[in-house]
Amino acid sequence: MVASASVAGVAGIGALVHVGPGLPGLYPVGMHVVPSLHGRGRHGHVALTFDDGPDPDSTPAFLTELNRLGWTATFFMLGSLARRSPSLAAEVAAAGHEIAVHGDEHRNMMRRTPWAAAADIRRARDTLAELTGASPAFFRPPFGTLAFGALRGARCAGLRTVLWTNWGRDWRSDATADSVADEIMRRKVDGGTVLLHDSDCQSDSESWRSALGALPLLAERLAALDLEVGPLRDHGLRGAPVTAGV
C-alpha cells in the first residue's frame, strides 16, 4: 500500500514508507502530501477499483452488476489468478474495464527483495497483457504496503503506483452492503479512488458479497452528488507518475 512530482516528494515520506507496512491510503497526511499516489483525481469523478481477482466464483457477478449500472472500473488483478482463469481475465477487459497490476502473487512487498518484487511485477504485467490484450498502466501493491523495491520495479515496468482514498472494509466477516457503502462515504468521495474486492482470496469467505451488494447503494448516493463513476484511466490524476528516484 514514492511518490509525486519530484524526488523531494519521495524524501518527504521516505521514512514513513520504509519503516514498515501500513495503510497510507487511509493516512490523512499522506493524502495531502502525495494526493496522486492515493488516487486523488479530478473533481466530479470517482475512480472505482477492485483488487484480488479474477475469481470465477465472484468476478462474473461484479461484471453483471457493473453492466447493469453502466459503470466501468479498474480491476487490479493478480497474475497467478489470471493464469488460472485466462478466459475470465479476457472477459473483464472485453467488457470495457481497465486492467491493472496487483502483483503476480499476493505477497507483502516489504518482505521481498527489490529484485524479487520487480520480477513479480513484470511477470504479472506480461501475463495480464498477454491474456487480456491490454497494456496495464497502473500498479497497486498487495495489502497497499509501499516498499522501495516495488515502487522502483513498477516504475521500471512502466506502471504508475496508485493506492486509494476510500475503502469499504469489505473483507471483514461482519461486513454488509450497508456497512461497505457507509464506510466509503465516510471520507470525501468527490475526486477519490474507491477500493473494493471482487474476490475473497485474501478475505473472509463470501465477504465479496458485501461489496457486490454495496454497488447499487453507492450508485444512489453518488448520483445524488452528481458524481461520475469510472476507471482510473479517466480520473485525471495530476502530477508526474509515481517514481522511486529513477
Image (spheres, grey):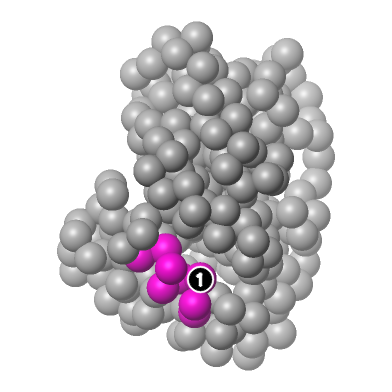
Horizontal side, residue 141 vs residue 57: left or right: right
Q: Is residue 80 magenta?
A: no
For the residue labelled by badge 1, is the local secondary structure a helix, a strand or a loop?
helix
Image vertical order of residue 150 relative to residue 82, above or below = above
Q: How many marks?
A: 1
Q: Position of residue 39 (x, y in %)?
A: 64, 50
Residue at image coords 67%, 24%: 157
Quadrant for the C terminus in the image: top right
Residue 12 visible to an observer of this rendering: no
Q: Amino acid at mark 1?
A: Leu
The residue tagged 1 is 63
Horizontal side, residue 172 vs residue 117: left or right: left
Extent of the magenta region: 58-65
Q: Within 10 Å of the Cα at label 1, are there few (<14), some (14-19), or many (20+) other Cα atoms?
A: many
Residue at image coords 72%, 69%: 45
User: Residue extending furthest front?
Assistant: 87
Q: Position of residue 208 (x, y in %)?
A: 32, 65
Image vertical order of residue 2 relative to residue 183, above or below = above
Q: Quadrant of residue 70?
A: bottom right
Q: Main secondary structure of the magenta part?
A: helix
Q: Quadrant of residue 142?
A: top left
Q: Nearer the viewer, residue 162 or 135?
A: 135
Q: Position of residue 149 (x, y in %)?
A: 53, 16
Residue at image coords 31%, 72%: 209
Q: Nearer the viewer, residue 135 or 139?
A: 135
Residue 136 visible to an observer of this rendering: yes
Q: Position of residue 197 (x, y in %)?
A: 40, 58
Horizontal side, residue 46 vs residue 233: left or right: left
Residue at image coords 46%, 37%: 79
